[in-house]
């Protein structure tokens, strides 16, 4: 193998012997080779993120979009790890009553993302911050017994069910090498250099996934790290990019390209894949925001025609835009409006074709904003 990206280290002896991967420090040596296609992808990815930032600045209700985008990224990132949950599950107004562990995975990701963004104002992106985010991610869900908020102190490995340290597809660094690699990654993340920030984000994600410092949740933390790094470096204005959209649709290739860096030292092919993911995810986010904005404008115009009733209806509509599945009782409490006022507004929204009553056996009626859900459900099933 090419040791540009690292080398395998023998551990233990005899029948227990296994080889773990010791990653080289970043940036790669020799340096990145920038062929014409890689340069084009860097330019295109940066341009699309610029367009996305521009759109997000101009939209007056961007916070509504962000609230939904964070939930979609959380869902997609969790689905990559095998979580069986849908967008409708995590938007359900009875979510607090749901004991589904898969939904808990997604909700924790949302909390972890919010916490990480807040903590970046106090801490640099580093091992300390990642451990705090991991604590939120793994709280009270499957894997919560696997040391939330702590780096592993045992060897882990990646492979098919039933694989061992000797037969695994990939064995991350042993504890000593992991500790050294994390310290080096902290330095790389926080050192000013001449690398394009998108290239640097790609290298950081690869390195973190290779170090695999937690017993569980590495994939979700690694993908969240991309978003936090881009926001911390002012490349992305807000959480309107969900790169897991592309990675989920190309999951096998995603893992294969990470492995090719480890096996052949070929960083360039990984960078091209990652930049393509950024470009395509940005393009998809732009199209989604535009569709959501058109839908908002069209339905707002319908509501204005209602005259004096439009104020309460618009208040409920604004709530529905960030909570596309509602029940009247919970909505009245959230908005501090009477049950009858919300029921009347919902009735008007149903008459306008904006809300649809779901067929359900529950005692409380549930209504959904189907046109918005149809936009958001793309690639989440």
Image (spheres, grey):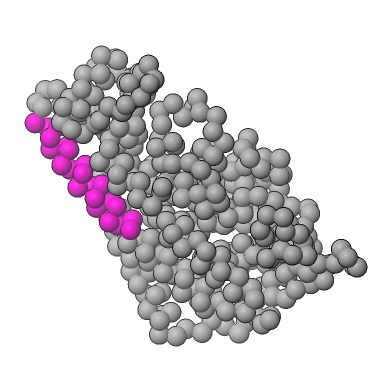
Residue at the farthest right position: 14
Q: Is residue 35 left or right of residue 156?
A: left
Front one among 168 and 91: 168
Depicted 165 relative to depicted 290: above or below: below
Q: Quadrant of the N terminus?
A: bottom right
Residue at the farthest front position: 162
**Looking at the image, how many numbered discs can be counted on the residues?**
0
Front one among 190 and 334: 334
Q: Looking at the image, which residue is at 12% across and 35% down?
A: 302
Q: Looking at the image, which residue is at 91% across and 68% down?
A: 14
Magenta stretch, overall SS = helix
| Residue 191 screen position, x and y as percent | 58, 68
| Residue 237 screen position, x and y as percent | 38, 55
Front one among 235 and 169: 169
Q: Is residue 111 visible?
A: no
> Which stretch is magenta?
284-305
Depicted 217 relative to depicted 17: above or below: above
| Residue 27 screen position, x and y as percent | 60, 75
Depicted 154 relative to depicted 108: above or below: below
Q: Looking at the image, which residue is at 49% across and 73% down?
A: 271
Q: Is residue 76 magenta?
A: no
Q: Is residue 304 left or right of residue 1?
A: left
Q: Is residue 293 magenta?
A: yes
Q: Is residue 8 visible?
A: yes
Front one among 333 and 245: 245
Q: Looking at the image, which residue is at 21% across and 34% down?
A: 354
Q: Is residue 8 left or right of residue 253?
A: right
User: Where on the picture, by quarter, is residue 167?
Assistant: bottom right
| Residue 64 screen position, x and y as percent | 33, 41
């Amino acid at each position: 193998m090419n040791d540009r990206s690292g080398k395998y280290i023998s551990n233990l002896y005899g029948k227990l012997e296994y080889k773990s991967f010791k990653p080289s420090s970043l940036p790669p040596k020799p340096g990145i080779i920038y062929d014409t296609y890689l340069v084009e992808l860097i330019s295109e990815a940066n341009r699309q993120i610029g367009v996305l930032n521009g759109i997000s600045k101009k939209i007056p209700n961007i916070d509504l979009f962000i609230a939904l985008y964070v939930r979609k990224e959380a869902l997609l990132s969790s689905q990559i790890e095998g979580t069986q949950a849908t967008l409708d599950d995590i938007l359900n107004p009875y979510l607090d009553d749901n004991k589904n562990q898969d939904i808990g995975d997604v909700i924790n990701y949302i909390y972890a993302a919010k916490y990480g963004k807040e903590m970046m104002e106090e801490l640099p992106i580093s091992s300390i911050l990642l451990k705090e985010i991991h604590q939120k991610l793994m709280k009270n869900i499957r894997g919560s017994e696997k040391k939330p908020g702590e780096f592993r102190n045992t060897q882990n490995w990646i492979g098919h069910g039933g694989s061992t340290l000797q037969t695994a597809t990939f064995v991350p660094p042993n504890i000593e090498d992991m500790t050294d690699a994390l310290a080096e990654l902290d330095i790389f993340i926080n050192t000013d250099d001449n690398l394009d920030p998108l290239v640097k984000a790609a290298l950081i994600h690869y390195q973190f996934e290779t170090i695999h410092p937690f017993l569980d949740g590495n994939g979700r933390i690694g993908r969240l790290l991309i978003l936090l790094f881009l926001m911390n470096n002012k490349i992305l204005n807000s959480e309107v990019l969900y790169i897991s959209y592309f990675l989920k649709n190309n999951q096998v290739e995603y893992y294969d390209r990470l492995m090719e860096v480890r096996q052949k030292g070929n960083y360039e092919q990984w960078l091209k894949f990652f930049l393509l993911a950024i470009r395509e995810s940005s393009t998809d986010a732009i199209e989604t925001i535009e569709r959501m904005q058109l839908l908002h404008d069209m339905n707002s115009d319908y509501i204005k025609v209602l005259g004096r009733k439009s104020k309460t209806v618009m208040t409920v509509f604004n709530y529905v835009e960030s909570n596309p599945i509602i029940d009247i009782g919970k909505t009245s409490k959230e908005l501090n409006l009477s049950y009858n006022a919300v029921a009347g507004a919902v009735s008007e929204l149903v008459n306008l074709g904006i809300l649809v009553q779901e067929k359900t056996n529950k005692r409380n009626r549930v209504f959904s904003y189907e046109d918005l859900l149809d936009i958001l459900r793309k690639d989440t099933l």
